[in-house]
Image (cartoon, grey):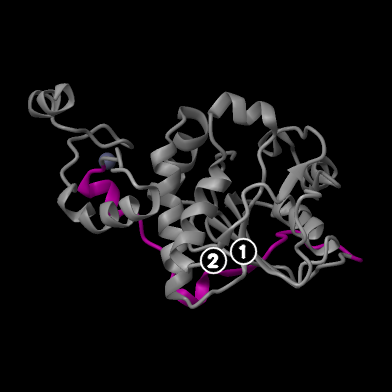
C-alpha cells in the first residue's frame, strides 16, 4: 500500500539515469519474462532514452575468440566467446552500476537480454555455468553478476543451471587494477576448479560473465571445465569493448 501511494506521489525514475521512467509500458514483455523466471515482479524502471541505447551487435558480429591477446601453446586457442553488446552507450553505464552501485536488477536485465539473444541465435548446451565471484566480493555486493547472467540464460534456453559447478581456488586481484595482459593472465592462472560434487564429463557448457575485456578470466575458467571433462565450452558475456575503444576500467 505504501509503495502504491509513493508511486502516485513520486513517479518511478530510471534506474540508470534518474530521469522519469517513461518506458515502463514498453517493458511489459520484459516484465512477463522476469515474472516467469523469478516468480516475482521486477523492480526495474527505465526511461525511453536509455532503453533505446540498448542495441545488440548484428548476429554475425557477436562472435569473438576468447583471448584478445592470444599466446603460443594455449591449450584452447580457438575458445569462442559470444558477446552480443558493445561496451558502449547503455551497456557501459549498466556494468559499473551493477558492480559499484549494487544494481542487481540491471544485472538481471543484462542476463535476460543475453539469454534471449542466445536463444534467438539457436545456441544450445546442457548446462549454463557462471564464473564464480571471490567470496569477499560476493559479501560486498550480495550477488554474483555472472550468475545473474547465467540463471536467466539457462531459463530462456531451457537448460540446466549450474551455479556452484565452478569454484575459486584462491583470491585474485581485481583484473581492472592490473596494467597489462601478462599481469591479468598471472592473476587468474589456476584460479578455478570444478566442485567435487559435480561430474561434468561429456557435457556441453555455456560459461557466463558480465563483461569480457582481455578474456583471461573466462579463458581460465573454461580451461578448468575442460580439465574436468567438459565436452565443449562456449563463453558468453553480456558486453565487451573488442570493437570500441573505451578507457573505462571494468
Ligand atoms: Zn534513463
x 82%, y 39%: residue: 169
x 66%, y 38%: residue: 133
Q: CA distance from mark 1 to mark 2?
A: 5 Å
- Tag 1 and tag 2, C-beta contact below 8 Å: yes
x 85%, y 61%: residue: 227
Quarter that holds the C terminus: top right
Q: Position of residue 248 (x, y in %)?
A: 55, 39
Residue 64 in the magenta stretch? The answer is yes
Quarter that holds the N terminus: top left
Left or right, 83 with respect to 199, comes to left
Check the image and name the residue furthest to the front: 197
Task: Say which quarter of the image contains residue 5.
Answer: top left
Q: In the image, which disc is placed on residue 209?
A: none
Is residue 118 placed above or below 145 in the rendered structure? below
Q: Which residues are magenta?
A: 46-73
Q: In the image, which disc is placed on residue 127?
A: 1
Say whether mark 2 is within 8 Å of ligand 1: no
Q: How many marks?
A: 2
Q: Position of residue 3 (x, y in %)?
A: 18, 26
Task: Say which quarter of the image contains residue 43.
Answer: top left
Amino acid at each position: 500500500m505504501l509503495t502504491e501511494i509513493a508511486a502516485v506521489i513520486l513517479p518511478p525514475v530510471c534506474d540508470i539515469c534518474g530521469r522519469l521512467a517513461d518506458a515502463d509500458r514498453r517493458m511489459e514483455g520484459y516484465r512477463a519474462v522476469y515474472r516467469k523466471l523469478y516468480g516475482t515482479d521486477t523492480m526495474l524502471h527505465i526511461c525511453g532514452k536509455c532503453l533505446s541505447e540498448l542495441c545488440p551487435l548484428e548476429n554475425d558480429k557477436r562472435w569473438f575468440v576468447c583471448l584478445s591477446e592470444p599466446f603460443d601453446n594455449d591449450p584452447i586457442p580457438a575458445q569462442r566467446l559470444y558477446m552480443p553488446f558493445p561496451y558502449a552507450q547503455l551497456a557501459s553505464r549498466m556494468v559499473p552500476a551493477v558492480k559499484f552501485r549494487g544494481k542487481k536488477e540491471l544485472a538481471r536485465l543484462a542476463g535476460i537480454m543475453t539469454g534471449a539473444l542466445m536463444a534467438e541465435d539457436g545456441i544450445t548446451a546442457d548446462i549454463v555455468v557462471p564464473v564464480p565471484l571471490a567470496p569477499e566480493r560476493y559479501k560486498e555486493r550480495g550477488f554474483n553478476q555472472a550468475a545473474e547472467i547465467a540463471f536467466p540464460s539457462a531459463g530462456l534456453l531451457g537448460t540446466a543451471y549450474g551455479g556452484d559447478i565452478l569454484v575459486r581456488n584462491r583470491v585474485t586481484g581485481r583484473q581492472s587494477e592490473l596494467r597489462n595482459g601478462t599481469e591479468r593472465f598471472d592473476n587468474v592462472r589456476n584460479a578455478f576448479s570444478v566442485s567435487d560434487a559435480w561430474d561434468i564429463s561429456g557435457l556441453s557448457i555455456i560459461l557466463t560473465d558480465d563483461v569480457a575485456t582481455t578474456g583471461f578470466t573466462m579463458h581460465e575458467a573454461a580451461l578448468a571445465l575442460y580439465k574436468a571433462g567438459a565436452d565443449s565450452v562456449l563463453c558468453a558475456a553480456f558486453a565487451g569493448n573488442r570493437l570500441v575503444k573505451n578507457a573505462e576500467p571494468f
